[in-house]
Amino acid sequence: MLSLDPETIISAALREPTEELLTPDNLRKLIETGVPLNHYIGFEISGFVHLGTGLISMQKVADLQSVGVKTRIFLADYHSWINKKLGGDLSVIRRVAGGYFKEALRVSLKIAGGDPDKTEFILGSELYEKLGVDYFTNVLRVSMETTLSRIRRSVTILGRSESEALSFAQLLYVPMQVADIFSMNVNIPQGGMDQRKAHVIAIEVGEKVFGYKPVALHHKLLPGLQMTKEDWEKLSAAKSNAEEFRDLLANIKMSKSKPETAIFIHDSEEEIKRKIRSAFCPPGETEFNPVLELARLIIFRDRREPLEIVNKKTGEKKTFENYSQLEEAYKRKEVHPLDLKETVAEELAKLLKPARKTFLEGPGRSFLEELRELKITR
């Protein structure tokens, strides 16, 4: 039983980078009735782990750990196979899941302030073998309560639009994702905002089919560094339409399949600086600014000392106690984009040092080399 009061737990769940909690009231009811809180977040096994997959996701795992929630990381090998990751080779997917991917998430969780030894890692195929026909039954129970058109709309989480050709297996992806939640008795499924459609199905079918309604936690998506002015204008215009906005952001999020849009957790200091120098960062604009998002969601999150930014032309130094001060100064054009980029790159490089050490010098080196030899980013 959780020893902390409901509001402390809810506050941890709502802390940024949480975008949405469906719903705080339902979470409060679970806590007050003494139901054990069981979390999970699932990952497809694909290319290198970037800041969104690693740090942003793991920040929420760390937050939930801090208030006594049991946390799980689901290594979704079958889902990855369905979605043709790593060349669609299931044996490769499983090997990478237990090697590079698990190690990358462990070091990311540690950087985010969590304890990887207190999180359970579960390989999808092992869960399915253990549950046998019970898991298959859960998939059918979800499918019987969901229409084909609803599934097709939800398959956009795979990074595909409805207009693209789908295999029948890809239509099974969403019922399987929902069945995963109930097969592990999870009541706090976590994912990025691009997972929302599947989680809403879980909430809607849960009570009727499985006897309880889960509380879905959705964290923010990091925009890709190489978003264009056109992307930025579309996002700005779509602010009043929540679904359109979510779909647009999902399409321009930091992506391992577009390496220049992403900072990988084991990137060298030179790679980090190069990518951020070329990032979209319009002067005076604070909304949907990829560089400022990195400052807000990562650099300032647990920072206990002021951030100093030096004007390279004049040598003038400005210090910021919190992100709000930086945002206001940038909005007034008191901070030049290049100076902001330089500082953000330096701070990220410091923060990611444990990941570089793990994958360039330590036990993760062989895992990283294996993935590089595959020459597959998807």
Image (tube, grey):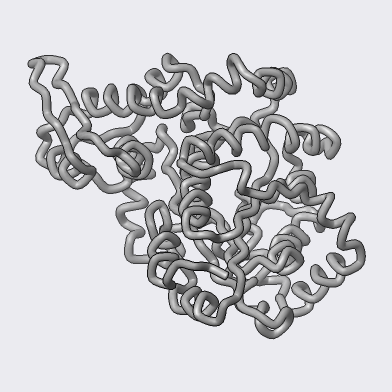
User: Dividing the picture into quarters, in which one does residue 214 lie?
Assistant: bottom right
Q: Is residue 284 left or right of residue 173?
A: left
Q: Check the image and name the residue furthest to the bottom.
A: 208
Please report the residue visible at 71 percent of the width from the left and 76 percent of the height from the top: 146
- Whether residue 315 is visible: yes
Please report the residue visible at 50 percent of the width from the left and 25 percent of the height from the top: 354
Locate residue 233, reporting x and y percent. Answer: 31, 48
Locate residue 184, reporting x and y percent. Answer: 73, 63
Q: Is residue 89 left or right of residue 229?
A: right
201 over 350 or under it: above or below = below
4 or 208: which is nearer to us? 4
User: Dividing the picture into quarters, in which one does residue 180 lie?
Assistant: bottom right
2 or 283: which is nearer to us? 2
User: Dividing the picture into quarters, in which one does residue 153 lie?
Assistant: bottom right
Q: In this view, does 301 lie to the left or right of 222?
A: left
106 or 210: which is nearer to us? 106
Please report the residue visible at 41 percent of the width from the left and 29 percent of the height from the top: 351
Please report the residue visible at 14 percent of the width from the left and 32 percent of the height from the top: 319
Locate residue 185, reporting x and y percent. Answer: 70, 68
299 over 278 or under it: above or below = below
Q: Quadrant of the C terminus?
A: top right
